Image (tube, rainbow, N blue to C red):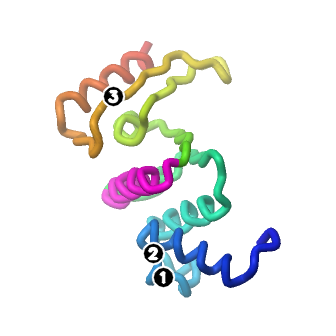
Amino acid sequence: MRGVPEKERRETALNFLRLVKLEKFADVHPHQLSGGMQQRVAIARALAYNPGVLLMDEPFAALDAMTRDEMQKLLTEVWQETKKTIVYITHNVAEAVYLADQVLVLAAHPGTVKARIPLDLPRPRDPLSSDFVAMQRAVMEYISH
């Protein structure tokens, strides 16, 4: 709310709901939304504050595989539109390679980076391409050793 007039708050909310493709559900209660839709609302709500960095910790872990794939595509679209820095934490290597510009593999010692792997794959990324699979293997090398 932060002193922002109600009309401006509503416009901001609707803009971000439109960005996550939920403008038709602006007047629906959260408990009436699916898990994927609730995640979309969470992304819109976070972006409405105009943060410098968006921190996402395993945001799609509880979603079914199809919804997770849709959310990954949506997050890529949101990033392309907003250009926000997103720190995305995941244990899913394929998801990391799909979403990231670089992957940091953390060591067992807290706060220690074991590897920094830049991902120089064109977008949109094809999870079935040989380059995508090769990047997954490169990341896995650091995880398994």
Q: CA distance from mark 1 to mark 3?
A: 37 Å
Rendered view: 86 above or below 137: below
Quarter of the figure with the N terminus: bottom right
Magenta stretch: helix, strand or loop mostly: helix
Label 3 SS: loop
> Residue at left 50%, top 24%?
105
Percent x, y of residue 44: 55, 65
Q: CA distance from mark 3 to mark 2?
A: 32 Å
- Residue marked by disc 3: 120
Who is closer to the viewer here, 32 or 130?
Answer: 130
* Mark 2 residue type: Leu
Q: Which mark is residue 22?
A: 2
Percent x, y of residue 91: 47, 36
* Mark 1 residue type: Phe
Magenta-colored stretch includes residue 73: yes
Q: Which mark is residue 73?
A: none
Percent x, y of residue 16: 53, 68
Label 1 Cα neighbours within 10 Å, binned few <14 / some 14-19 / many ≥20? some
Percent x, y of residue 13: 59, 74
Magenta-colored stretch includes residue 64: no
Rendered view: 53 above or below 16: above
Q: Earlier in the sequence, mark 1 or mark 3?
A: 1
Label 1 SS: helix
Q: Which residues are magenta?
A: 66-83
> Residue at left 66%, top 52%?
51
Q: Looking at the image, which residue sits at the far bottom?
A: 27
Label 2 SS: loop
Q: Which mark is residue 25?
A: 1
Q: Give left or right: position of 47 versus 80.
A: right
Q: CA distance from mark 1 to mark 2?
A: 5 Å
Q: Are marks 3 and 2 in contact (CB under 8 Å)?
A: no
> Residue at left 44%, top 65%?
36
